[in-house]
Amino acid sequence: MSTTADPVAQGVNSPVVDVVAKTTTTVANAIAKTVAVISSTVSTSSTTGATSTIPTSSSSTPTTSTTFAYTPTPTPIQSTSPSLEDGAEKLSVKDLSQALQHFGIVDYLVFIAMLAVCAVIGFYFGFIEKKQKKQKLPGKDGGGAAGVEERRGSEALDYLVGGRQMKVFPVALSLVASFVSGISLLGTSTEIYVYGTQYAFILVTLAISGAISWYIFLPVFCNLQLTSTYEYFEMRFNKSVRLLGSAFFTGANLIWLPIVIYVPALAFNQVTGINIHVITPIVCLVCIFYTTAGGLKAVVWTDVIQTVIMIGAVIFVIIKGTLDVGGLGVVIQRNFDSGRFEWPEFTLDPKVRMSMLALMVGYVGHNSYQFGCNQMMTQRYMSLPGVKQMAHTSFIFIVGLILMFSLCLYNGLLLYATYYDCDPLTTKLAMAKDQLVPLLVVQSMSSFPGIAGMFVAGVFSAALSSLSTGMNSLSAVFLEDYIKPLAKKPLTEHQTGVTVRLCTVIIGIISVSLVFVVERMSSHVLQLGIAIGSVVQGPLLGLFSMGLLCPSINSKSAITGSIFAFFFMGWLSISAQIAINSGEIHPEEKPVSVEGCDYEFDRSLLTPANATLHMGESASLSFAEQLYHISFMFYTLMGGTLSVIVGHLAGFIFGRNKPGDVEDDLLSPCIRRFHKSKYSSVNLNENSLRSSDEKP
């Protein structure tokens, strides 16, 4: 960060003021509305006292098609409201919800400050540093042909991979910020609140997945020094496979990015009452600006700032929330009494939502793709100068992920300890599952001006880091895989710069527009993100596995396997989503209680008439139903495995590669060993050439 401080202070002042002024003006109306809400409900807020002590409990779903397990708790509610103790009329859930929407001026200023800092970083890397670099170029370039060729394409190199000169620690933090999106930040805590601690065992799978990705996938991409990971498919197969892989990645991100944007908009709506379709375009415009202007360098450094905000906000909420409920012992005891502390089920039944098999096999496969094959992750590694730095970055990234997820998992336990006898989902105080964490924040942090703003800024930071990463990665894929191959002549440096920035803007606008679609899907976002993403992530995992691990599979067989898996996973995910929305699939949730609620809500929500029967026994399901009832944790691995199996079978029709058709550098090291044993003479020649190159 020290490299950016002085130039920003020296040359950004007037342009940055314009950026901040525009952002401030846009949010002014929202601030005025919130202040009006506060003033109109101030008497209400004073009667409720410290809203953090409003008891509530564990999860039920916000829809009427949910099974409700009613478990009263004998512990009486200790209300801090004198008016309630005196028998005064209780607040309705609607009035309480409005009273909790007290996002004040300080909160808005904190939130705007985060956006302003991101915009300044983008402005610096997009204009000031770029100008300084151009001024230095003539001194370094002797005017020879080599210098001209080196500058040719440097726009794309700087914009997409930071000139391959990024530092280890900021890149590692950027990887953490990109992976821990708002989906993980809110969805992980909600998962623990609703279903218990089974999901906590992902901490073990993160380390396993990191090792698999580093030893199987990343060494090949690191050695090839690719900008787009899908360039590998043209080297290993042909241009058709490369275009297919790029199309899969494009589709995956256009599905995933709207979900990433929607989650923090839900949090903002919970604490302010402002419609998600008002705040989403405002915030995303800032993200589009700094990503478009500054490229990967701006993305990485804004990720660093956003990671610090994100971690700080979560830690503050955890400490304050734990103190409010009575300490760590109370948190553990209440979760233990409710049965939330449990191991994943040891079963071979793939339909069990969160079994040990689903976590240790299915989720490991899913994360192996995310860590080792996903363009958004590998592009960060490609920005580093060497393999040694990549290894260090990978280690710090995994450690950071484990720490971040540990905080989110504990936050889920804290949610239940806070709402153990008045479930806000049942009472509709929270309208969606993923609004539980923001609700906890506004209730426990009401006496600390700016903390709610810091938390919402943290959630949006997680989302913006993922959004900026997605836009930057997609622009790399568009340039390298679509535009350059179709261009009749090489793009000039100016044309390259304009093209990648235009792609970034278009991708951002499309992502914001698709939020309307995501809003109509009722799944918990953690499950929705994995299930829908698997439609293309599974075939992509299969393509990379066939290329790196199966040298006998040729291009036609690879295309056949991946396309078959794409259509199968599309049917599977859509069928599962329909079954979830209709109530056919309804995983068993942990019991909740509303015994201690000290506000009025619609009691008809507790009647058995609104309950949905659990799904029938496995024997009563048809074969198709058996398939789409399989745990969503297996989806990505299923798609990848199906691709490889069909690819091998297609070899009987399209033939197979002969030994020696595939270069060693295109195979994973674990397969290369066996390949080298058959062609030792070739490898000896390669090694001698490499050793001669290394000598001075």
Image: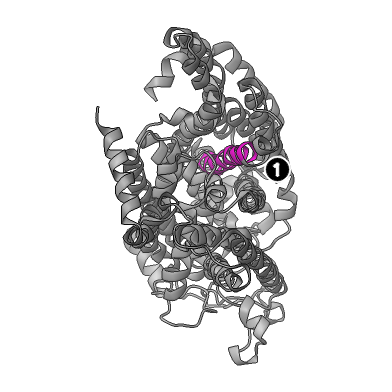
* Residue neighbourhood size for the residue with mark 1, other residues' Cα within 10 Å, grouped as few (<14), some (14–19), many (≥20): many
> Which residue is at 58% across, 31% downward?
291
Front position in the image: 370 or 173 = 370
Q: Residue furthest bottom?
A: 619
Q: Point out residue 639 in the picture as x, y percentages from the top left corner.
A: 57, 67
- Asked whether residue 469 is drawn in magenta, I would say yes
Q: Which range of residues does the magenta coloring cover? A: 456-480
- Rendered view: 240 above or below 11: below
Q: Point out residue 451 in the picture as x, y percentages from the top left corner.
A: 49, 39
Residue 165 in which image quadrant: top left
> Which residue is at 66% across, 38% downward?
485
Q: Of helix, strand and loop, which mostly describes the magenta segment?
A: helix
Which residue corresponds to mark 1?
Answer: 512
- Rendered view: 35 above or below 395: above
Name the amino acid type tagged 1. Answer: Val
Relative to residue 198, is residue 443 drawn left or right? Answer: right
Q: Point out residue 201 in the picture as x, y percentages from the top left corner.
A: 39, 66
> Which residue is at 58% across, 28% downward?
290
Q: For the residue labelled by badge 1, is the local secondary structure a helix, a strand or a loop?
A: helix
Q: Which quadrant would the N terminus be assigned to in this image? A: top left
Residue 104 in which image quadrant: top right
- Asked whether residue 242 is drawn in magenta, I would say no
Q: Point out residue 174 in the picture as x, y percentages from the top left corner.
A: 45, 39
Front position in the image: 294 or 321 = 294
Residue 320, can we see it?
A: no
Relative to residue 18, is residue 213 drawn left or right? Answer: left
Relative to residue 26, is residue 155 drawn left or right? Answer: left
Front position in the image: 268 or 398 = 398
Q: How many marks?
A: 1
